[in-house]
Amino acid sequence: MGAGVLDSSSPGGGTAANMGTQTFGGACKDSLMLSFIQQLREAEIPISVRYILEFYRGLQKGLAPDLDRLFLLARLVFIKNVEHYDVFERVFAHFFLGKGSWQMPDWEEVFAGKPFQEWLREQLENGAISAEELRTYGIEELLRQFWETLLAQTGQHDGGHTWIGTGGRSPFGHSGHVGGGMRVYGRGLHGTAQKVIDKRNYINYSEKSPLARENVSQILASLKNLKRAGPETELDIDETIARTAKNGGEIELVFAREFRDRLKLTVLLDNGGYSMIPYLDLVKSVFGKIRDHFKDLKYYYFHNCLYGVVYQDLPRTRAIPWEAFVSQGSDTHLIIIGDANMAPFELMAANGSLYIQGSDRRPGREWLKELRAAFPASVWLNPIAKERWSKESVTINRIARIFPMEDLTLAGIRNAVQILGRKR
Amino acid sequence: MEFEGTERYYLSPELGEIVNISISMEKPLLLMGEAGTGKTRLAFEIARAFGINMEEARCKSTFKGEELCYVYDTVLRLNDSRFGSGESGRNVNDIWDYLRFGPIGRAFLAEDRRVLLLDEIDKTDSDTQDNLLDVLEDGSFTIREINHKVAAQHMPIIIITSNAKRELSDPFLRRCFCHYIPFPGPEEISIIVRLHFPDIAEQLLEACLTEFYRLRGQGFEKPPATAELLDWIGAVRSSGGNGPGAGKAVRHIGTLLKRSQDLLKFKGVNQKTQFR
């Protein structure tokens, strides 16, 4: 601790007390931070060792002197996708502020734990919190002070800027300002974490399904398709030298096209109806995996069977015309993900569409055949396991006669990739 | 160094803190979010606030990464070897005369610490992004032709922006600090408007913002963003009259909605009926 903390205005005064807090700050804080990280992991946020080391480096640099900044530091280090913002905020709020219900609240454990008990005893002993104040504090306030003491005690102590000995800026003895509700203390940043968390800005992006199957992306990456494309802009040096030599030193420049990945992939996803609900998580995991591998990747959505219209957005409000969708066909790979499980009349009967406003007269089967003809490289992935297809529904096998169909297992996806590759 | 925004640029406290954390941790800061949230602007403002120089790379889909470090001009050298370098002073025997450094190269070689902006990284291939990562993390690259290693004298402050046209690869994200900038709320945006129009009347501002957020909520293909709002307010003010109009009578709608489909939708032509 720097000289600043031994300032005469320090509430408890004595060096011994400060020494005490310091030693307890280190190891206990580590274990508490680790259990925070553990909770993030339990919330299925992918966290690598690298992040943890970075996080500690940040703490050591004193980048998180208060909860607001701890919130930002942790989010910057751990969260790489906006999809995870919401769940991160909930875990943070739960862990540090005791709010909401991020699964099991282990407050009992924290309160009964040695670090908290020691801290509390010390606060009472050195008069930072009086017994009367303690009674007026809510659990949240107490926890907040506990965390912020810990935070302020690692990190660099530059002069008088730490919490102890800064007189009016000390969070302690300010119970009058607290007024029951939550108040996150922080220089210049009052209440950022709290405000942000309450807004839950990122709830729309939340998709609770981090990806478990690492190898799916590798399998799909094998779809990559490098071809020479674009203008001839790359100087072929070997060829240029050879030709120049043949020309007796008269320079002849030879250009070649670059290698580029030209593969276009369209994914058509059945996102409606109860029949798909049990499979949505599974599908989403594949979904996230394949995103970054392709030159051009588009998603469209449909409901149950296709009736001359697909949608650009998840809630299926922005329709795109069938002709436009089908016309991109010949050089695009198409993956349809759906359970192909529908009432037989939807597939077979003219006017089978469940939607009254749709005016299509052709049965679903016809539309599917047309789609298949338009996309020579197409495959249907079914989340229902292969061996259960005939048990689940008659329509599955009927559709499997139109589209090559595989199930959403690693083997199935591998086969699907091969099917797409063959039709290239 | 502590970054606190500049007088022409409104910096939310949260974002300011994020910039400072990234700088102290020496990590590239990846900013995501829709157009008009001030991602690119931020890099310029950091450079201005610290009074340091900036290197800027506007990414294109044809980039392979290396050209951001250096370009070896073989054609020029061939030309010089055949026809002589004339009065240019280039020495054909010296490859260094034919190497040109890109933004990353310049930022690494500079004597001072610089801000390095990689704008719209999502336009590049994922291979390119991976190549860039190694370079940015190590703070060095190798000039292949002469096997010469260029190492950064001072690690630049790296700001990367992405419009999320395509998702960035996991390894890329892993090595950056990522921040998603949400679209500013009414409070923040009125601060921004006031920075540009300090004398705007309270009533006009309120009327404009109400209409603006109403339009944003209507799900246009390209919802109006900050830049459009500022243009629009500028147009409304300079054309005199009272107020921005409301509902279908919004004035200068062309400054807010740019796509013809959006304009048609605004005027009440129902697109969906045409698709059925």
Image (cartoon, helix red, strand yellow):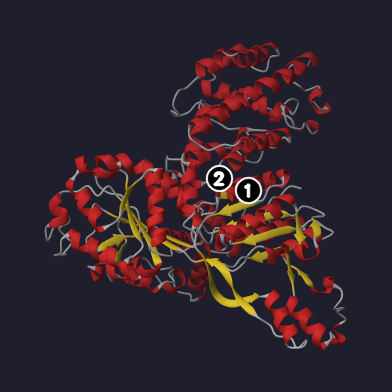
The chain that hosts pointer 1 is: B
Q: Which one is nearer the viewer's eye here, A393 or B243? A: A393
Residue A400: which disc?
none
Q: Nearer the viewer, residue B49 or B149?
A: B149
Classify the position of the C terminus of chain B by image quarter.
bottom left
Query: What's the mark number on residue A80?
Result: 2
Provide residue B77's location: percent of width, then percent of height: 78, 79
Q: Which residue is mark 1?
A: B176
Q: How packed is label 1: few (under 14 Cα within 10 Å), some, or many (20 or more)? A: many
Is residue B176 placed above or below A225 in the rendered structure? above
Q: Position of residue A259 (x, y in %)?
A: 57, 68
Quarter where residue B40 is shown: bottom right
SS for tag 2? loop
Q: Position of residue B210 (x, y in %)?
A: 42, 58
Whole-Å distance between the Cαs marked 1 and 2?
Answer: 8 Å
Assess whether mark 2 and mark 1 are in contact (beta carbons under 8 angstroms). yes
Q: Is residue B177 visible?
A: yes
The residue located at (28%, 63%) in the rendering is A372
Q: Where is residue B197 drawn, in percent x and y?
A: 58, 65
Q: For this view, does B184 lie left or right of residue A272?
A: right
A1 sits left or right of A344 in the view: right
**Pointer 2: residues within 10 angstroms few (<14), some, or many (20+)?**
many
The kind of secondary structure element at disc 1 is loop
Q: Disc 2 sits on a residue from what chain?
A: A
Give the residue type at disc 1.
Answer: Cys
User: For the residue marked with disc 2, what is the amino acid?
Assistant: Lys
Q: Is residue B159 above or below residue A179?
A: below
